[in-house]
Image (tube, rainbow, N blue to C red):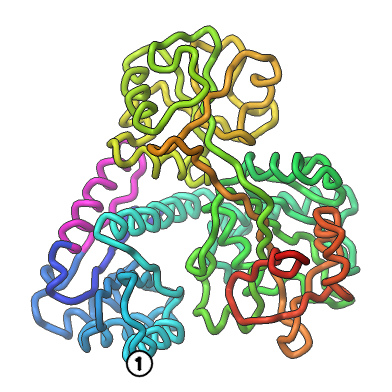
Amino acid sequence: MKNDLTIFVSGAKRLKEHRLTLKALVNNLNGENRLKGCPVTLNMFSYVNLGDNQAEYDEFIMNKTDIILFIIEGRMGEKTKEEFLLASEQFKKTGTPKMYVFMKDGQERTPEFLELERLISDHCDSYYIEYSNLEDLEYKVKERLIQEVDALMESAKTSPKKTIKNLKIWSWLATLAFAGLLIASVWGWISRSDDVTLLFIGGGSAVRCLEEEYKDVGNVYDYDNSICIAVPTSTSWPIISSEVMQHHAIKGENVSKPFYPVCLSAMQADESSFLKMSSRTQFVGKGSVLSFHLGDDYLCMYVKKSYQNELIDGKDAINTRELADFLRVISQQNVKIFTTEEGSGTLTYYQNSLKPYGIPLTKEALGEHVDKFTDLTPKSKIRGDEMPYIMLGSRYYVAKEVYDEGDCRPIKVLDEDGNPIQKSIFLYFAGYNEDGGTSYWIPDAMVKLLLKIDPEFGDIIKKNRIPRENERIIVSLNNYLPGN
């Protein structure tokens, strides 16, 4: 297994603070990896390490770099542009280096800026990622580096026979698809018709929201001709990307169409969420990601009734500052802290809300009492006879068997202004270009699901086609319904 990733930071020399911040970030990630027993080491370089020899830059980018980070504030300098084009050409030939472009938001849309957007769209393996300040840049770079490390770790676990070729998504998905094909064959789900097996992928809060707000759908885990697998949002979005780019469900008599992924997410995606495999131009040429806003959820902490603490005793709501103080206290007590999976929408909302108070929700920060609960089924690790515990969940995300037994009580989480911290829940799926790009085609199974969600979709979807009104990466179907 490859146990290191070489990262090169490209950008104007004046961005010294940015390079130092990212260098410190990599050092911290390496420390976290060692504590977790992860063997992957991140090595970060910039012009500081290579001096002013452009030939050394070129050699390093082409043959030694796994990931290159472009940091742009204002215009892209000529040297940065040369490195960008070189990395782009090398990626087309060999598949490395992986390119991420981070651009400061709020820049004036001058002709030069629009030309820069076009350059990135045409040559980069993803669209650019906006950041608001140095802290935001650090957070967004960290998020993507963690994904790269996870992908490297997962690829080491998957045998070559189970690898899905030409898909730049986590290699564990190959195992999932292979196992799914065996299951589908046994039950006779695979046919040579327009029908597909819906693969629901997403978090527990989104699954439960769909079930409770749209009664005609029923139990998602037992939905007709489907499979439901709970995975974090950060894992499910790349699967939708691959579906758009690979066009798996193209109609044809000799084409088996076993799976059509449907992402249920408690996070709102932006264009960069899906542009991991292609440029924006390539992506919209194949299709788009269709989105439907299912509803809203709010953060809700659940506490074992037998546990007493002066910070929460008798309360039915707690603000983020109080929650931060509470977590500091109980991390020193014999109390179990349950969170959702890393990368899930629910945990991301908690992390962002607690970040100003310096509370990271990790075993390293809060001790060995931190654990995960993963979905709404009895697979959850929480039992009624557990030691005192809290669950950092939401109205829709709670270990159901514990809640039904009446062993815990909910406490709503508020922001500093006293308002519930809400998270929106979305449905994402692939729409393929049809009729010369004037409409999106979706399979029968997806049409049936949309009609269960809202019968008025019957006035919009004709012969599996939805009118294409723009060339956006993410198309909101809420805008198609009357009254929106």
Left or right of residue 358, residue 252 in this image: right
Q: Position of residue 365 (x, y in %)?
A: 31, 30
Q: Quadrant of the C terminus?
A: bottom right
| Residue occupying image coordinates x 63% and y 40% | 205
Q: Would you say 458 lies left or right of 308 here?
A: right
Element under disc 1: helix
At label 1, counting other C-alpha atoms closer than 10 Å, the crowd grade (few under 14, some 14-19, many 20 or more) is few
Instruction: Tell me, yes or no, whether the highlighted magenta stretch contains residue 13.
Output: no
Residue 404 position (above or below residue 252):
above
* Residue 56 vertical position relative to residue 269 in the rendered view, above or below: below
Q: Residue furthest left?
A: 51
Query: Residue 468 falls in which quadrant of the image?
Result: bottom right
Q: Which residues are magenta?
A: 18-44
Residue 371 x, y percent position in the rendering: 47, 27
Q: Position of residue 168 (x, y in %)?
A: 53, 66
Q: Amino acid at mark 1?
A: Pro
State which quarter of the image contains the N terminus: bottom left
Say which residue appears at 70% left-offset and 30% top-offset.
377
Q: Is residue 29 left or right of residue 384?
A: left
Please say whether residue 24 is one of the residues in the magenta stretch.
yes
Look at 69% across and 68% down and name the residue there: 479
Residue identifier under label 1: 111
**Which one is nearer the viewer's eye here, 11 or 267?**
267
Residue nearer the viewer, 80 or 397: 397
